[in-house]
Amino acid sequence: MLKTITSRIRSDLFTPPGDQFDALHGLRAIASFLVICFHIAMFSGNIPLMPPDGKWQLPPFYLAINGFWSGLDFFFVLSGFLIGRILMTNVMRSGSVQFPRFFIRRGFRVFPAYYLFLTIATFWYAGAGIGIANWHLSLGDLPGLQANAWQNYVYIMNYTYAAFEPSPMSWAWSLCVEEHFYLLLPPALVLAYRIPQPAWRIRLLVGITLAPLLIRMIQFALDPGIIMTEGFYFRTHNRIDEILIGVLIAYFFVHHEEGFRALTVRLGGWTGALGIGIILATWALGGLQQRGLFPVVFQFLLIAIGTGFLVANALFLENGLTRLLAHRAWYPWARISYGMYLTHPYVMFWLIGFPAVFPTPTALDPARFILLYVGVLLGSGLVAALSFLVFERPMIDCGIKLSRRIGAK
């Protein structure tokens, strides 16, 4: 029995599939670490969510991690590439996007854990008085939180939620963006593949990718004082270009792999260097709390382009960066990153409620912050691993079996 359990854990959490890109697992794990770090700083009040009045000042420690919000953008690009590659490969093999099989597999992958933790948070955790959860989640208004939860259940809270409103899972706005992408990409690809000329098909995909940039320009022209965290930052139409950058990478990988490879090899080490440089420059010039043309209009697309260079490096180059990202140590964290994203704030709310360790949660010194960060990683990692082994993996297997039955008909 013990041997069977150990084998199952090793297979599900520690053994990467042979048909995937190992370096992308590393990028996913790093994205998870970055966004959890930023969320801890933000939810604990050490990095303000809203723009400060007057001069923008942060202690050097928190200033250094203020750009970690972009871990979500790494996820967006990776999702666009991986999902786009699957659908485009389906078109290449069968001439069809295969909607039913895609939606069934995606649904069984993302819905079970999401609805499980959302329901637990809404009807138990938020009202249980755990740590500072009641303060953060409901602001003393549990009926209001539960009344607002429908927005999360139907994946529209990124349009209906406002910062500081009661919400059982305010960070799920990014999952709404991804879900909208899952619904929009298949018909968009059907439209694109009806264009017989590949050049015009590429132009269409590039045009769709740049559309959110134009939309942000128009919004900024109408209101130069936009505060991103008052809703702008969460909207699908403002953020989906990051996912579409991943789709463009997938298109060139599926249809023009040799040319894509040749261009990346020609760039060589500059591929990864450009990616890291663009991301760091965007961190320095932008930020969620900033106002103005660059942060509102350009920073999201630039983060996505920088991430795209890292993806290209991982796909085609065998260099130090690729070897680092492909290390086996990243894979378990990448495997459970979805569950960690769902649960890490709840773990943080619980841990930070111990006054003997965190007497002033809104003024954490670096040592206490690092202690909290490690605790959240380990705690949410344990919850996510158990969820994956006991609940998510069986659901994934059910989705695979059901999709194969549909495909066989």
Image (spheres, helix red, strand yellow):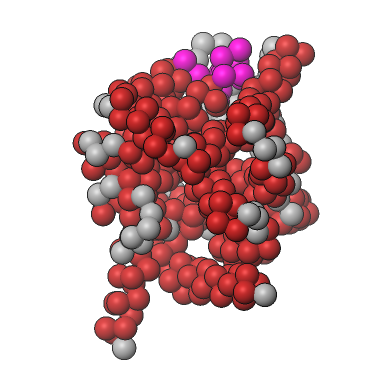
Quarter occupied by the N terminus: bottom left
Above or below, comparing residue 105 to residue 234 in the picture: below
Q: In this view, does 60 lie to the left or right of 285?
A: left
Residue 346, magenta (yes or no): no
Quarter occupied by the C terminus: bottom right
- Residue at 31% across / 25% down in the picture? 266
Residue 384 location (% of width, % of height): 44, 62
Q: Residue furthest front?
A: 196
- The image quadrant that residue 208 belongs to is top right
Q: Is residue 363 left or right of residue 327?
A: right
On the question of residue 126 being in view, the answer is no
Q: In this view, does 320 lie to the left or right of 216?
A: left
Residue 170 location (% of width, % of height): 62, 45
- Residue at 26% across / 26% down in the picture? 269
Near-viewer residue (340 or 63): 340
Above or below, comparing residue 366 to residue 217 in the picture: below
Q: Give the range drawn in magenta.
A: 285-298
Above or below, comparing residue 182 to residue 234 in the picture: below
Residue 59 location (% of width, % of height): 38, 22
- Residue at 54% across / 35% down in the picture? 248
Q: Is residue 397 left or right of residue 376?
A: right
- Residue at 55% across / 70% down in the picture? 400
Near-viewer residue (249 or 172): 249
Residue 328 location (% of width, % of height): 26, 54
On the question of residue 48 being in view, the answer is yes
- The image quadrant that residue 71 belongs to is top left
